[in-house]
Image (cartoon, coloured by chain):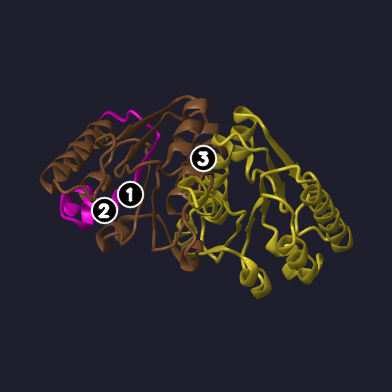
Chain colours: A brown, B yellow
Amino acid sequence: MSDTAEERPRRRSREQPLLVVNTGRGKGKSTAAFGLMLRAWAQGWPIGVYQFVKSGKWRVGEHKAAEALGGIDWFKMGDGWTWTSRDLEESSDLAREGWEEVKRRLADQTYRFLLLDEFTYPLTFGWVDTAEVVAVLRERPGFQHVVVTGRDAPAELIEIADLVSEVTKIKHPYDTGQRGQKGIEW
Amino acid sequence: MSDTAEERPRRRSREQPLLVVNTGRGKGKSTAAFGLMLRAWAQGWPIGVYQFVKSGKWRVGEHKAAEALGGIDWFKMGDGWTWTSRDLEESSDLAREGWEEVKRRLADQTYRFLLLDEFTYPLTFGWVDTAEVVAVLRERPGFQHVVVTGRDAPAELIEIADLVSEVTKIKHPYDTGQRGQKGIEW
């Protein structure tokens, strides 16, 4: 066996498509995912961001930066719509619609880095079937990193994930009655 | 009292210069800080990044993105140098040099968002005096957000911080012998 042939498996084992889950009740789950996105961008990879929660000014900073960097497709489920919407029927439809789109992109291998921001919520709410998500992510073809953020990631998702971080709140300005502010919260 | 006068204090209290600390043993402390940097960038704020650990490919993705975005000053303490350097004397000198520079920038109010990446290490190692850091950060003039990342943030720093998140490792590819890879670790 030549040296080159011996090196190949080692190189393959370094490059693995990862499922990353950032969960927990602290701040920094999504910001960490967007920090990771910068590394993917620097590699020149096609990137897709699916924002499963949109409320007011959330992620406007990250979105603006993504537009400036270029090469990042950004999708907001139900523009201007929040999970606290009274029309839960519609919200669940939008979440399912978003997931169907993600499934198509995974099947087509459109992206090398997919960020499913706040995707744990539609799972927790039962709007999107966790078992189906687990099966689709586990069996995704090719080389696609997937990052899922949000509180209370389902155990089945954590089970199949490669890298799971939990962010815990030690201290927060809200504790002392301070409100969210630009450049920090959005 | 007019409505406008009544509104003013409320508006002031919303905008507070924050000391943010991302600590813990999990992945995502620095990536979360760089995600936050995107929000600061989107506000058009002058940004300074002080990278207190530089080893190999660390942060190359974030650095490349910062250069593409523009308006972000990036300083690496001791280019090509790591904390594991055998010449600890020199490493401590470099760390102190970096902190002295940060002090000058804080005094001059050069930036509105300062990222002191991996800054807990020189504190833990005793290379930079934690009491002095705490005093300087607490008394920093004007409006300067400061973000500190790294494991084992000193209690005194957490004490004066406004927002503290701890990142815990639930699962990591290294656990199964997998090595770091581009687009994820750098």
Judging from the image, what secondary structure is the residue with disc 3 in? loop
Q: From this viewpoint, which residue is outermost toward the bottom?
A: B155
| Gap in angstroms between the C-alphas marked 2 and 1 | 6 Å
**Could you confirm whether marks 1 and 3 are on the same chain?**
no
Looking at this view, is B107 or B176 the one in front? B107
| Gap in angstroms between the C-alphas marked 1 and 3 | 21 Å
Q: Is residue A108 left or right of residue A147?
A: left
Q: Is residue B133 left or right of residue A49?
A: right
For residue A96, what is the image quadrant?
Answer: top left
Judging from the image, what secondary structure is the residue with disc 2 in? helix
* Position of B38 relative to B1 (above/below): above
- Which residue position holds label 2? A121
Please give the range of residues in magenta. A108-134
Looking at this view, is B102 or B109 the one in front? B109
Q: Where is residue A4 drawn, in percent x and y? A: 55, 35
Q: Chain of mark 2?
A: A
- Which residue position holds label 1? A118
Q: Are marks 2 and 1 in contact (CB under 8 Å)?
A: yes
Q: Where is residue A180 drawn, in percent x and y? A: 47, 53
Q: From this viewpoint, which residue is outermost toward the left?
A: A89
- Which residue position holds label 3? B183
Looking at this view, is B3 or B108 the one in front? B3
Residue B60 in view, yes or no: yes
Amino acid tagged 1: Glu
Residue A10 in view, yes or no: no
Q: Chain of mark 3?
A: B
Quarter of the image where the C terminus of chain B is located = top right
Q: Nearer the viewer, mark 1 or mark 3?
A: 1
Looking at this view, is A121 or A172 the one in front? A172
Looking at the image, which residue is at 55% across and 37% down?
Answer: A2
Q: Is residue A23 left or right of residue B112?
A: left
**Could you confirm whether marks 3 and 2 are on the same chain?**
no
